[in-house]
Amino acid sequence: MKNVIIHKIVTFIFTEEQLRGYWNKQKPAVNFDSLTNKQLMKLAEDMLHHSSHSQLEQHILDHGWRTKDEKEGLVLEEDESREDIHVEVVDTSIPGRTSHKLFIDRLTELTCDSCQFSFYLRELHTDGTKLSCPSCGGPVNEK
């Protein structure tokens, strides 16, 4: 059997109310409002790892309820310590810079000219414009 696996970078947004609900379900002794930004990031990652695929759909940017305005505001804290994930706490009630787009070293993003499908290749050593889209077969370009 030949399976095709395409790894795509996805932005997940966990709102304060969703995090509060997840925290309260765990019945902690500590009040949610007393959590630090680092603890909020750890809580969101825990929620990410313990959510089913259908539960995760509600957190995907531009999919379901999550919109771009939910990631715009003052970045209060961020964790760039790992090469495959970038985590931020953003206060959307305070104007500020837009959340970072994750950049992963050693990956090349290619986008189809025909259907706009995006995919990533690791350590591309050939001309990416000679590749075709895995979705529709159309021509692709490096972003």
Image (cartoon, helix red, strand yellow):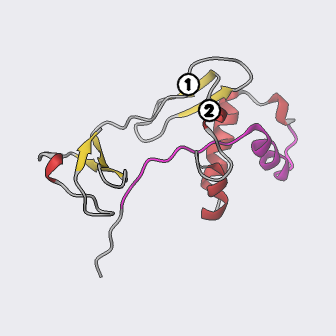
Residue at position x 32%, y 68% from top?
A: 4
Question: If you read the primary sequence from the N terminus, does the residue marked by circle 1 or circle 2 appear first?
Answer: 2
Q: Amino acid at mark 1?
A: Thr
Instruction: Tell me if residue 24 comes above or below residue 36 in the rendering.
Output: below
Q: Position of residue 52 (x, y in %)?
A: 63, 63
Q: Is residue 46 left or right of residue 30?
A: left
Instruction: Tell me if residue 73 comes above or below residue 4 in the rendering.
Output: above
Q: Is residue 8 magenta?
A: yes
Between 101 and 50, the one nearer to me in the picture: 101
Name the residue carrying label 2: 71
Q: Amino acid at mark 2?
A: Lys
Q: Secondary structure at mark 1?
A: loop
Between 110 and 138, the one nearer to me in the picture: 138
Q: Secondary structure at mark 2?
A: helix
Q: Quadrant of residue 106?
A: top left
Residue at position x 29%, y 46% from top?
A: 110
Report if the CB atoms under discs 1 and 2 are less than 8 Å apart: yes
Q: Is residue 80 left or right of residue 132?
A: right
The magenta region covers: 6-30
Residue at position x 60%, y 52% from top?
A: 63
Q: Position of residue 74 (x, y in %)?
A: 64, 20
Name the residue carrying label 1: 98
- How busy is the neighbourhood of tag 1: few (under 14 within 10 Å), some, or many (20 plus)? some
Q: Residue furthest bottom?
A: 1
- How busy is the neighbourhood of tag 2: few (under 14 within 10 Å), some, or many (20 plus)? many
On-image quarter of the C terminus: top left
Q: Is residue 50 visible?
A: no
Spatial distance from mark 1 to mark 2, Cα to Cα? 7 Å
